Image: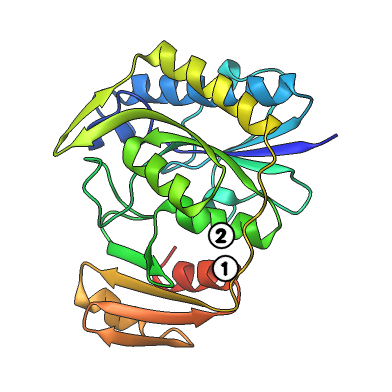
Amino acid sequence: MKKIFISADIEGVTGVTSWCETRYGGQGYAEACRQMSLETAAACRAAVEAGYEVVVKDGHEDALNIDPDLLPRGVRLIRGWASSPMAMMSGLDESFAGAVYIGYHSAAGTDTSPLKHTVEDYLFNWIRVNGVLMSEFGLNSLLADQLHVPSLFLSGDQGICREAESLYPGIVTVATKTGVGNSTCSIHPQEAVEQIEEGVRRALAADIAVRPLAKEYVMEINFKDHQRARNASWYPGAEAADPFTVRFCASAPFDLAVARTFMCGG
């Protein structure tokens, strides 16, 4: 049976606006987890109905956010972390026919979401690969490319949807909200669920090709603290570009993931 991999985050879920809603025990966290689960379930339903086996990776913080009871029967859910550089894509391999991204958010270095960040908000000002500002989608879709798995669909704030469309020709997106300053304007939760289910259905019916791999990948990480940049510059093959920026060259996206993991402590 064909398989679809779903990587789910929470900051791009409709209605989620403040950091407290994304953290265990915070105000609004339980409601955000429920909506994350419902939006993920919508993507699962579309894939199951199309005849796919579905694997979901809970990709937010402790990776214990999605309510399994809200997912369709037969879906497999990966919770927790596998101590792997694949991180939010842990569990993905060459056997999957496509990757879907739910609840994704704008990149660090942008102004289109009050929750914008890339990987760790407290560590990085921005990450670039081959001169292009990277979001978590940008980094994770590179890992999927290396495994010859096309990125088919993404939901999240309007900023990440625009980025995904510019990086990945043909990808289907659903914007759950727009962000201005510390505010968001979100679509109705049920509308988000309906649009995601329909969007994934369209994406699975489309012919979306894997992007060709580059010959070389140059990752630049701009740290918030110069001390962390100095520590990272000792990683084999890394070099300090300036007191806050470390540069690393690789021949494959997975090598970037390994370097980022060890340079940044996880």
Where residue 197 sits in the image (x, y, percent)? 57, 20
Q: Residue at x 71, y 18 (%)?
A: 73
Q: Does dot 2 land on a helix, a strand or a loop?
A: helix
User: Which of the two residues, 30 or 248, is positioned nearer the viewer here?
Assistant: 248
**Left or right: residue 73 compared with residue 244:** right
Residue labelled with disc 2: 142
Q: Considering only vertical position in the picture, is 246 above or below 164?
A: below
**Left or right: residue 72 compared with residue 174:** right
Residue contact between numbered discs 1 and 2, judged by CB atoms under 8 Å:
yes
Image quarter in which the N terminus is found = top right
Where residue 31 sits in the image (x, y, percent)? 35, 19
Residue labelled with disc 1: 253
**Left or right: residue 168 compared with residue 182:** right
Q: CA distance from mark 1 to mark 2?
A: 6 Å
Q: Considering only vertical position in the picture, is 27 above or below 248?
A: above
* In the image, farthest residue toward the left: 181
Q: Considering only vertical position in the picture, is 252 above or below 72?
A: below
The mark that comes first in sequence, 1 or 2, is: 2
Q: Residues within 10 Å of mark 2 (few under 14, many from 20)?
A: many
Q: Quadrant of residue 79?
A: top right
Residue 100: image tag: none
Q: Residue at x 46, y 31 (%)?
A: 65
**Left or right: residue 36 compared with residue 43:** left
Q: What is the three-letter code of the residue carrying label 1? A: Pro
User: Which of the two residues, 31 or 214, is positioned nearer the viewer here?
Assistant: 214
- Can the viewer see residue 189 in this picture? yes
Where residue 62 sits in the image (x, y, percent)? 44, 42
